[in-house]
Amino acid sequence: MSTDIPESKEAAMRMADSDFAADRREHDVRSALLDYRDRIRAGELGALPAILGLVSLVVLFTALKPGTFLSKGNIANLSTQALPITILAMGLVFVLLLGEIDLSAGVASGVCAAVMAKLIVDSGQPWYVAVISAVAIGIVIGTAVGWLVAVVRIPSFVVTLAFFLGLQGVTLRMIGDGGTVPVRDDVIVALANKNMPIWLGWTLAAACAAAYAATQLLRWRRQRVRHLHSRPVELVAAQSAVVAAALLAGTYLLSLDRAPSPLITLGGVPWGVPLVGALLVGCTFVLGRTSYGRHVYAVGGNAEAARRAGINVTRIRVSVFMIASAFAAVSGIVAASRLNSVTPDSGGGNTLLYAVGAAVIGGTSLFGGRGKARDAVLGGLVIAIIENGLGLLGTKAYLSFLITGVVLLLAASIDALARRRRSSAGR
Amino acid sequence: MSGTPVLDLRGIDKSFGSVKVLHDVAFSAYPGEVTALVGDNGAGKTTLVKCIGGIHPPDRGEYRFEGARVRVGSPRDAAALGIEVVHQDLALCENLDIVQNLFLGRERRRGLVLDETAMEEMAHRALSGLAVRTMGSVRQPISTLSGGQRQTVAIARAVLWDSRVVVLDEPAAALGVAQTQQVLEIVRRLADNGLAVVLISHNMNDVFAVSDRIAALYLGRMVAQVRTADVTHRQVVELITSGVAGEPGPRR
Ligand SMILES: Nc1ncnc2c1ncn2[C@@H]1O[C@H](COP(=O)(O)OP(=O)(O)OP(=O)(O)O)[C@@H](O)[C@H]1O
Ligand SMILES: [Mg+2]
């Protein structure tokens, strides 16, 4: 929200000569960087903790498991491992933006995956019917949760805890104790197990990089022409370049031949990655560029103010739970694709905590009003790296639980401390 | 000045649970005039304003707008009629920036997409009319503003629209001397432009400086609605503190 504005006391003093001086002032790279530093100091951390976490985890696991962690096969593995967590977390961002929580999203993903698998296996439905039905079930669950939270006004913590327990029973009833429903449909399996043709991966990556740069530059020019607040063009260009580099580097790594035997070739970007990319673009657009997104932030910031501004707060509250559960359905489908099956434990265990952790690590606040769709991607990668790295190290199960718990607490602490910092800095 | 009120409330009752806060209140606001609403703490001024703005719809009574009976059940209904309220507790979203708050609930769009540039330009124009000192950027979040600056934003939000009635609940409470003067000037200017302005204030000097009429609430009852020119300072203070005024009595 408050991305590019100089706003600290220091910055204010530098420009206090006239009103809205900051909007008319020429920004150069130096002043923009100073403003950024001031913002970080005031607790406006943005993506910084997640990026630092990513880098240090990669360094740590590369040091502990040289050769294996950064092998081509494991990088591809990592990318598919992050998919379900990221999708689940992206839906949860909407709920967290209101300062609510959805503890049932994980098991809801299990129920939806079971519905999909049963429809394909037992009723012989085509994959698209199964997928649409699963998402529809997700939306129904979300509507029920949202209604209980927004209309009946039960705290979301309690409602979703009840659903967390109840929905596990539903999955168990559908699949049976110890049962497994195999997922063999080609399209579903392809999501996490098949790769795009190499040329398509490159084309998509290049197109996305170009589109990102174009929207950034067009926005910059529009602001510039109308003499509105804008950032230095060097920074806009640098940001576009970094995004392009990340996209192309990822595509390069995933396009290398990672087949264990020289007789076959195996390479390309897994199909699930562009799916997450599309969801990311869609959510970023909705949250940042539409009235609906603006209203979500407003309700999360001050529900009474939003109500007085004429926003239908109840509708916004119900809708975020619907979005979270619909995303949970998609996440459950991708998880089923990755494991080639659905079991009664699908979506249970620590699935939800991983997703909440991902959103919070990425920078979404548990207190509501702050967060972005990209947080889910950054945080999802962090969580996947931890899960993957601990797996490679052969860490005992009890230790994995402990470590994951500590990481979640750490992220929540950063969130709480940054919030304290903001309020003491008068933000 | 003018004859018929834009806003005309009659027999308004409002209770919170078993506590009756407004008793059979009548209140009118006239176009081109500033009506000051006065009363002690807890007299029910804010409650009346919330009834006008659709925040708490009244339990009973008649709500007339430009002579016609209307139902104002939500803030959206009030805004649709052209009634803007600056609330005593400012009702801004601290996590959003100034532009986003000004247009909250009424965003400018081009198709599906928010028209940020148009909103930013309009915000600049609205705020430069209010001459706020030391506000760095219209893109800074509300949480970085001082109390007085927040108040200015809240006022700007009410005057940004093409409204008929503007209600200000103690708008100058957090403002410095110069800013208070500025707000009073805005209040006067709005009325001179033909709007009906309702101003709540505890400061008698401000009330006498800008208002054309004074309405006094005492323990939830409207005890007088008089022309400012017809009463003295002392009489208004008596109305506020005891509900009755000494000689010469208030003429209706
Ligand atoms: N939501 C509410 N629930 C219960 N009682 C309320 C509520 N809002 C106001 N009241 C009561 O109604 C009475 C009038 O309150 P109101 O806020 O209208 O006073 P006011 O005239 O605006 O006072 P002030 O000058 O202090 O702003 C008070 O006694 C208050 O306790
Ligand atoms: Mg009040």
Image: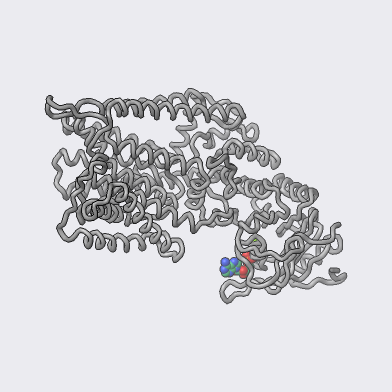
The residue closer to the viewer here, A262 or A54, is A262
Residue under the image location 61 percent in, 63 percent down: B73
Quarter of the image for residue A21 reads top right
Q: Residue furthest bottom?
A: B18
Quarter of the image for residue B123 reads top right
Ligand 1: image quarter: bottom right
Image vertical order of residue A313 relative to residue A354, above or below: below
Coloring scheme of the render?
A: one colour
Residue under the image location 21 percent in, 47 percent down: A183
The residue closer to the viewer here, A177 or A396, is A177
Q: Is residue A395 left or right of residue B232?
A: left
**Residue A125 percent location from the top left of the image:** 27, 51
**Residue A240 percent location from the top left of the image:** 43, 27
The residue closer to the viewer here, B236 or A171, is A171
- Does residue B170 appear anywhere in the picture? no
Quarter of the image for residue B251 reads bottom right
Quadrant where the N terminus of chain B sits is bottom right
Residue under the image location 31 percent in, 52 percent down: A134
Residue under the image location 65 percent in, 58 percent down: B78
**Residue A79 percent location from the top left of the image:** 26, 36
Q: Is residue B104 left or right of residue A196?
A: right
Quadrant where the C terminus of chain B sits is bottom right
Q: How many marks?
A: 0
**Residue A35 percent location from the top left of the image:** 49, 32
The residue closer to the viewer here, A17 or A151, is A151
Q: Is residue A49 left or right of residue B90?
A: left
Q: Is residue B119 left or right of residue A372?
A: right
- Does residue A313 appear anywhere in the picture? yes
